[in-house]
Amino acid sequence: MKGTESETDLNERENTGKAAGRERPGRSGKPATAREAALRVLERVEREGAYSGLELNRVLTEAGLKPQDAALATELVYGTIQRLGTIDDVLAARVKGWPRKIEPWVRCLLRMSYYQLRWLDRVPAHAVTDEAVRLAKKRGHAGIAGLVNGVLRGILREGVVPPPPAGLDAAESIALEHSHPRWLVARFIAAYGEAAAEAICAANNEPPRASVRVNPLRADRDELLAAMAAEGIDAAPSRLAPAGIVASRAGSLAATPWYRDGLFTVQDESSMLVAAVAAPPPGGRALDCCAAPGGKTTHLAELMEGRGEVIANDIHPHKEELIARQAERLGLTNVRTTVGDAAELAGKFPAGSMDVVLLDAPCSGFGVIRRKPEIKWNKTEADIAALSELQRSLLEKASGLVRPGGVLVYSTCTIAPEENEETVRHFLAANPDFSLSGDWPETIVAALRGAEVLPEPFEGMVQLLPQTFGSDGFFIARMRRREA
Ligand SMILES: C[S@@+](CC[C@H](N)C(=O)[O-])C[C@H]1O[C@@H](n2cnc3c(N)ncnc32)[C@H](O)[C@@H]1O
């Protein structure tokens, strides 16, 4: 099973805008143009199962393209992966042996070119085909250039958007329209109904907005908003998260002096709710069981006003450094890192020794598809079942560390009920000394109630879908252990 660490608190895929730029002449070994860079990323994702966001960052750093070219490459990578199902349907009808008999780089070139023809209206069709043929000639033999030329010109001649097949059921029709696997759409329909399922799939194809969480130990939200406005950044307070700012036309916020000086953390708005809901007491002791890269650890530490202790654990030794670096950047001295399996934390700390335990569990990541579109093509039903089992076991084991009267928060960045509400219900049924706690910050409850996403009566758990606030899809449950 690959990729059980789906959420990222760096908004890997910020809205990079729609500007297509001129492409500059190449330097040897590095991708010289936006399309070459995009092709390289797509090919690695296809061949090696690489994560698109990480691979894109790597290739863009190596290529050193101008910002507008980097924006185009970003759009080509994400757009092509997002629309993969629809694109492959069209190409399968035109290319014999599609996809298996076609070399991966040719597949990626055809997919990326069809994506532009169909969804990027600012790029003229002749520019798309000419560039595709140029890339095919540069990399392959004349036969491949001929194939690419023939397929793309055939599509242009006969109509870029084929008529939809007749007799599709609801799941098939949403799957085709919004390019998701049918099995996943059928699950969304079963869990949330047809209209919501369609809205989820549409939202998954939207670029995420940039958002940051203000560090109250170093900055004030209103002052930072004013400073951003003075720099021409279109920024507003988050409707959802008390410490959040949502920005557009912001470029990379992680490249600003504000970020370097620890004034904020780049984080999705719904992810910002988790530590706020946990509400750790200043001076207390909190444990973040699955903590890397540290988005919620540092938030817990900020809410504790830099006092007490947050123990940040992750299973991967190389991620410890990520957490420590964030804590240092933000000036937080109350974070301690540990490495190990969350299932074994009970052996490392005394039972009942934590005021707050957060299990931000490894999950299928269906709430962050817009940031990592390959998730929808790579994950399987079997992954959901395996993750659900892992989550149940981690929750059970981590719960023993909560002190009587203390708080246990369980969260994921997915929208599969088996990993969320069902996991929590299963845990509560076996652990009668825990119960749900609706004691959430007033402002958050008001925002959720305003958007009509709070179940009534509100017990203490919420499933956020990506279309409601334009945030990541997230699940959060707050539980309390009975006093001794
Ligand atoms: C959803 S991410 C956590 C995101 C993090 N809480 C944040 O806000 O930045 C899940 C993390 O769990 C870690 N992980 C996966 N399995 C684990 C296990 N058995 N024990 C501890 N950590 C685990 C992964 O390395 C990954 O960093």
Image (tube, grey):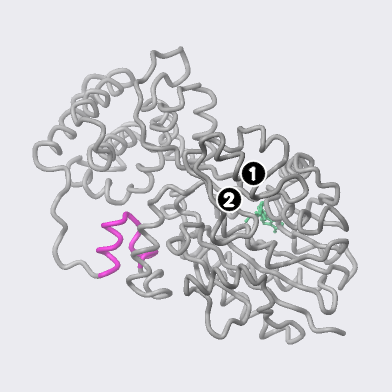
Residue appearing at x 53%, y 50% in the figure: 236
Residue appearing at x 24%, y 50% in the figure: 89
- x and y percentages locating residue 143 in the rendered image: 21, 23
Q: Main SS of the magenta segment?
A: helix
Q: Which of labels 2 and 1 is toward the front?
A: 1
Q: Quadrant of the N terminus?
A: bottom right
Residue appearing at x 43%, y 74% in the figure: 191
**Any part of residue 6 in sight:** no
Residue appearing at x 72%, y 46% in the figure: 219
In-front residue for pair 352/255: 255
* Label 2 or label 1, whichever comes before in sequence order: 1
**Separation (CA) of disc 2 from disc 1:** 9 Å
Q: Residue furthest left?
A: 158
Residue 258 on the magenta span: no
Residue 245 has which mark?
2
Question: Would you call the spot at circle 1 few (<14 residues within 10 Å), some (14-19), or many (20 or more)?
Answer: some
Residue at image mark 1: 224
Q: Which residues are magenta?
A: 170-185
